[in-house]
Amino acid sequence: MEKLTVRDFDPQGKRVLMRVDFNVPIEDGKVKDDSRIRAALPTIHYLLEHGAAVILMSHLGRPKGKVVESFRLRPVAQWLSGLLKLPVPSTGDPLGIGTRDAVARLKPGQVLMLENLRFHPEEEANEDEYAKTLASYGDVYVNDAFGTAHRAHASTVGVTKYLPAYAGLLMEAEIAALSNLLEKVAHPFAAVIGGAKVSGKLGVLNHLMDKVDTFVVGGGMANTFLVARGYTVGKSLLERELVEEAKQILEKADKKGVQFVLPTDVVVAKEVTRGAEHKIVPVTKIPNSWSAVDIGPASIEAFKAALDPAKTVFWNGPLGVFEVPTFGDGTRAIARQLAAKADEGLTVVVGGGDSVAAVEELGLTDKMTHISTGGGASLEFMEGRELPGISVLLDRAKVPAGAGKR
Ligand code: ADP
Ligand code: MG
């Protein structure tokens, strides 16, 4: 369902309460990676240029309902201030009289950031009074926090009981890119699935079974499937209790004529650490006391060949332990291939915290069609689940009378 966006109301003179996902890494009081902050800039700029006062709210880390000094949003507000070239004060608490006053003083064209929403347990509990207080700060609610859309919290769901709720431009782009994959994708469509969390990803494989032409499975994921095919994987990462389900997925793919590409050779290491002894072996010969840490060179070629005819690729999960550079060949090779093909018109959508980090490390972010800012959220979306933070946004089809008013 298409959602109303910031372009569907007149921001002039309104206080816009905007949920962002500024859950960024901070080290020594400095923002280490500001990509999530930058991703929200188009919406913030749009609102400011159209005469709104913007009240930003986010969580940071897991303070578990208490004030934790290292999770204060001040460094984030300062960073944003630098990007916007505007002062961005942050309140000392999302609640309280000081915050209410700061909101009341806010003028069109100005920005205020509420303190970390998760300093109160009511945020994650989606407690109604808390949501109501947050909502009282704004005339309109905008959600640009795709990365938190799979959570029903006070700031993502609760507030929408009290304010008309619109998607921000980032939210809109995320929904468009991911729903295109599920609804009107150009074929051949291939999904490259890797990484470590098999349990979290079998749902994605199941949901994509009816939509893709090809699955390419590598990384830690592959081991469970290799065992399902009857191989042994030594000390490799394996979710043994999921082998049965992996077998069923392989059978389903077979029945449906979906190509399912697994590694034929792997890099095995004695330890999953930097500098560990390692060698290339066929998957039929993974030694008992070694771990598969990357796909091998023959697999890289086979993966590339399988992806070659694709018009659309969804990629989630690195194909090896890429944090150790020696075990990152597979991930790098596939990332480069997809980036090069994207230049020639291939649609490439990358989702998942670590896969995105790998693409960023290679400086290939701009080459890809869409890089999702939501790890867990993009996976749940690709599983076909409804995300609570998206469902509550106003639908384009049925605009309630009085939307935009209070
Ligand atoms: P994403 O965040 O992209 O969804 P995951 O969180 O599922 O991906 O997995 C990322 C992790 O998977 C990385 O830390 C990487 O080191 C690990 N990984 C990839 N391949 C292997 C492997 N063969 N064995 C163990 N871990 C692996
Ligand atoms: Mg991850």
Image (cartoon, grey):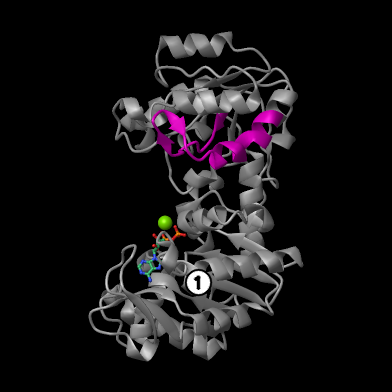
Whole-percent x, y for residue 41 in the image? 64, 34
Residue at 76% x, 67% y is 344
Where on the image, by quarter, is ligand 1?
bottom left
| Residue range corresponding to the magenta coloring | 17-45
Q: Which residue extends farthest left?
A: 289
Q: Nearer the viewer, residue 13 or 378?
A: 378
Position of residue 100 relative to residue 58, above or below, is above
Pick the residue in front: 226 or 10: 226
In this view, the residue in front, 358 or 7, is: 358
Find disc 1 in the rendering and name its residue: 330
Occupied quadrant, residue 369? bottom right
Can the viewer see residue 229?
Answer: no
Q: Where's residue 192, x and y in %?
A: 54, 71
Q: Residue 159, how many percent across, how many down?
A: 49, 31
Asked where in the image residue 70 lies, by quadrant, the reply is top left
Q: Residue at x 67, y 52 (%)?
A: 366
* Residue 399 in the image: above or below residue 54: below
Q: Is residue 33 magenta?
A: yes
Three-letter amino acid code at disc 1?
A: Gly
